[in-house]
Amino acid sequence: MSMSISTSSSANPSGAGPSPVADAPSSTVEHRRAVHPRARRVVPAPLAVPAALALAFLVLPLVGLLVRAPWSTVPQRLVEPEVLAALRLSLVAATLATAVCLVLGVPLAWLLARVEFPGRRLVRALVTVPLVLPPVVGGLALLLLLGRRGVIGQWLDRWFDVTIPFTTTAVVIAEAFVAMPFLVIAVEGALRGIDDRYEEAAATLGANRWTTFRRVTLPLVAPGIVAGAVLCWARALGEFGATITFAGNFPGRTQTMPLSVYLLLETDPPAAIVLSLVLLAVSVGILVALREKWIGQSA
Amino acid sequence: MTTVDNQDARPYVSNPAPPDAGLRAHLVVEHPAFRLDIELTVAPGEVVALLGPNGAGKTTALRALAGLTPLTGGRIDLNGTCLDDAGRTFVPPERRDIGVVFQDYLLFPHLSALENVAFGPRCRGASRGQARAIAHEWLARVGLADLAGRRPRQLSGGQAQRVALARALALRPALLLLDEPLAALDARTRLDTRAELHRHLADHPGATLVVTHDPLDAFVLADRLVIVENGRVVQEGDAAAVTARPRTDYVARLVGLNLYRGHGDGHTVTLPTGMAFATADTVHGDAFVAFAPTAVALHPDPPQGSPRNTWSATVGGITRHGDHVRVHLVGGPGEASADVTPAAAATLRLEPGQPIWAAVKATETRAYPAG
């Protein structure tokens, strides 16, 4: 008898009568749990209305594009040589620009995420400048650097007889310039997100920094790199301002899809709509495909 | 040891256990809010446990040895080679002959168990085939040959622990470091894994340092204990020595003893609270008195007669402790734990706040110098 009293007092050292005290709080918790989700389901109007407007604002222009598309003539317009040339150039240039961004941007992201060096914050700020810079200004800056009389361009021209502006190379450079920050920021974020003790573990197993990067870091941030590359590629594909300033508008050489759309709008609006549809389809298609394959997996 | 004979017969043998073999370290790592300052030696083949409460500096010590945190003072020598002298010399982790088993294992999630174990040999110059052969051998040794192709997330906690051990041992390191090797496992898996880990550590020819806060892990796995508190070594010795003569409250609690510090004068130790303990041992000067909770008898009235240490106390709390009842006492020498049978607890009608008399025979106490 008295034995059982001593055990119950040990389970509840406060010594108060156990059962009523223990029951009261738990029933309060259940009560709260039952009511609150329903209460939270009511979205206040000051948030609901702007949110709905924002969604409409983002979606309706695309609906307009689809409504006004000359659907009957779409197939024949798509196979016109100029359209195909612009599409091909756009895809090739955006892909090359993304490749350049990957090769140069991933190491830069690693440096920003993993190495303490003086002026790191300044470097990080500089990396984001092309993100906020008007692309036309970026194009002009590239022209002043790499143009025939540019700071570096004059030497390229004089010594190697290489001219960059108004070539396909210029398209790739312009696109890489505006798109690289997207990749660097995405990859740096991914690098900061992974547990850097994996890299320490690799070091204790005899891996130097390069081996660690190649065999441990890179596979771990692969989803982040893919996400960054998709953003980068999409930005490059749509690039207009820097491209037209630095690379000009030569059909088949530097005239990418966005440039064609802009010019056709004056001469042949239905053709501009068709090209826009193609750009829309390609962007959405790639985004959806990669989202399912990579981004969805990491989220 | 046979190596001595080898040394005489074949002087060109490259690694004949020199007198400075194993680990000799004086680790000093200073942070703004913390200072670690401990000396450690571990002989080849010896397993030493670095035991201490959370925040004692155990993990900092392990990181300093592995080269993941540089020393701010002191020196690390492994088999006669200086790894870090807090100045000119700093050997980076990838060039230290040290294997680490991390607390949460840190198996590379994108590699199979086999590739994880092969990682080290591959980095140290083995060909792909050689590295895989070594990895197979080690996985077989820890009993996981069947699971070589599994990714870490497909392994149980105990299996992951064994892969991590195989990965660290595959380099045959001169020093093996284990950080809380069993902490991430559930109680059942712990028991099996502890026994198996003990076998692997006993087979390891290099020095081994196990960092743990669990005294049972330390007692089972290690030949010798080094106990750290607040960045300093407070006690060293084998399990028997440490359990017999704890020197701090932390160690006393680990081994389940009541411990007091006072001034010895023959068969009496006087505590700062004024209480004088009669002891069977003879001590002079600064001294410890220790006794087991089971040595404390509880009485409702002042005990009469026999030469006992008695004091009046208040019951602070009562808990189940194995098959007896542990009573927390306040008063007399300070705080004390007493273990009584459930029957005795029932007879005494113990409850918190109740006044009671405690008694300990002089023969049940141990007294030893604190100097």
Image (cartoon, rainbow, N blue to C red):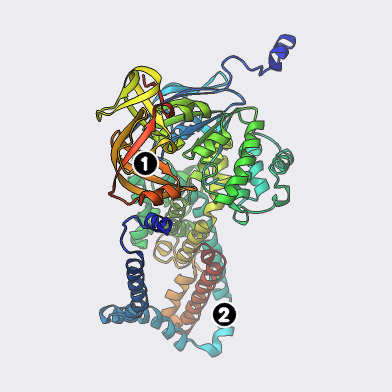
Residue that appears at 65% across and 51% down? B112
Q: Which chain does the residue under circle 1 lie in?
A: B
Residue that appears at 72% across and 14% down? B6
| Residue A101 horizontal/vertical position (percent) | 49, 54
Name which residue type carries label 1.
Answer: Leu
- Any mark on residue B80, and which? none
The quadrant in which residue B245 appears is: top left
**How far is mark 2 from mark 1, CA to CA?**
98 Å
Q: Residue furthest top?
A: B8
Residue that appears at 39% across and 38% down? B297
Q: Is residue A290 above or below residue A6?
A: below
Name which residue type carries label 2.
Answer: Leu
Q: Secondary structure at mark 2?
A: helix
| Residue A79 horizontal/vertical position (percent) | 60, 79
Q: Is residue B196 above or below residue B367?
A: below
Residue at which label 2 appears: A78
Q: Is residue A32 above or below residue A140?
A: below
| Residue A38 horizontal/vertical position (percent) | 35, 80
Point out the image quarter for the N terminus of chain B: top right
Report whether mark 2 lies on the same chain as mark 1. Answer: no
Asked if residue A167 shows in the view, the reply is no
| Residue A118 horizontal/vertical position (percent) | 35, 38
Q: In the image shown, does B183 or A126 lie closer to the viewer?
A: B183
Residue at which label 1 appears: B298
User: Tags 2 and 1 in contact by the CB under 8 Å rule?
Assistant: no
Q: Residue furthest front?
A: B305
Q: In the image shown, does B113 or B1 lie closer to the viewer?
A: B1
Mark 2, mark 1: which one is toward the viewer? 1
Residue B98 placement, left or right of B127: left
Q: How many marks?
A: 2
Q: Secondary structure at mark 1?
A: strand
